[in-house]
Image (cartoon, grey):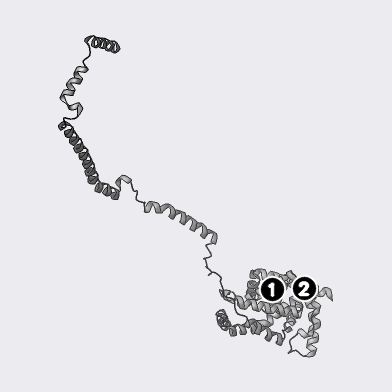
Amino acid sequence: MEHIKSQLKQLKAIAPDREFAARAKLQILGETRAPSFALPRVSLPHTISWGWLGAGLTTALVAIVMVIPLAFPEPTFSASLNAENIANEYGNLPINIQLKEISYEQRVNQTIASALTEVSDTKVKHLNADILKTEQAETMLPESSTTDVDAMLQQIMN
Amino acid sequence: MKDEEQSLIQKAKNGDSAAFGKLYDRYLPPIYRFVFIKVGRKQDAEDLSQQVFASAWQNIEGFEFKGFPFSSWIYRIASNAVIDYYRTYKSNVSIDAVSEEHFSEDANDEARVDHAINMSAIRVALTRLEPDQQNVLLMKFVEDLSNKEIADALGKTEGAVRVIQHRALKQLKTHIDGTH
């Protein structure tokens, strides 16, 4: 076996050409080294594998997503309890009331004015006393027809 | 030695080409040898060696010490380059193509001829081993790497390296004896 080993050691005699060695060196060192875009390596302790780390991070993320809404509850805004809306409504309330009162008073005034005008105007036919008497006389119906009408009304009501 | 190498590596990581040049001078011979023994052709060995160091220069920023020797890192690049070479070309590489021109220029003529004859046999036998067995024997007995360095380079445990080495030596002896 020692003979084999000594034969193997003879292979040490193999050597590259000096010319090749120099030429290759110039070529290699003349090359610009490409910029490294590799991501920084992260070393993990031997007891932790990437798989376990990934599972742990996922669990932590899920837990955080579940806990955040409990820790910071989102305030609920009811339309009826919204202070801003209430303030706006309250601010507008007297104006609305006043507008309605003004509108009502205008209508009342107009009605009174027209009523007074009609009362004071004796030329209007339906307020003329003579015409009213005339019309009353004309509308006086005979007694018999009145009796008939009463009887018919009585019959309908029964 | 180790501190000096660590300093060179750190400088090279920061873009110091002169520092990487010193690492190149130190590691080119063993890497070239390792590649040449596996591919058996001078031109291919030169191309692959250059490719290994070009890749090392481009990627040295990603090298981290952490008890992982630089030698193991560069042998791993070389080993992968050889795997890609065979996967791509599937060429019939003849180990017999070795001639004395590949040997160190420091050796004298007679020694170079003897080396050529002996190496022919050992290399033919080596190529008949599994790639891992070849790697372990070359790293252990040609390059004198420690079992830890070999284990790091091949991504195996030191125990596995010892087992591979034991089996490889037995098998290599069988192949060499069979050729005589």
- Dot label at residue B127: 2
**Circle nearer the N terminus (1, 2):** 1
The answer for which chain carries disc 1 is: B
Q: Is residue A147 above or below residue B89?
A: above
Q: Are marks 1 and 2 in contact (CB under 8 Å)?
A: no
Front position in the image: B159 or B48: B48
Residue at mark 2: chain: B
C-alpha separation, residue under disc 1 versus residue under disc 2? 17 Å
Say left or right for A27 vs B170: left
Three-letter code, disc 1: Ala
The answer to whether residue A65 is left or right of residue A126 is right
Q: Which mark is residue A44?
A: none
At label 2, the amino acid type is: Thr
Mark 2 nearby-residue class (10 Å; few <14, some 14–19, many ≥20)? some
Q: Quadrant of the C terminus of chain A?
A: top left
Relative to residue A60, is residue B138 drawn left or right? right
In the rendered image, the vertical position of residue B24 relative to residue A59, given as above or below: below
Quarter of the picture holding the N terminus of chain A: bottom right
Horizontal and vertical percent for residue A25? 65, 84
Q: Position of residue A131 (x, y in %)?
A: 18, 23
Disc 1: CA contacts within 10 A as few (<14), some (14-19) or many (>=20): some
Residue position marked by numbered label 1 in the rendering:
B81
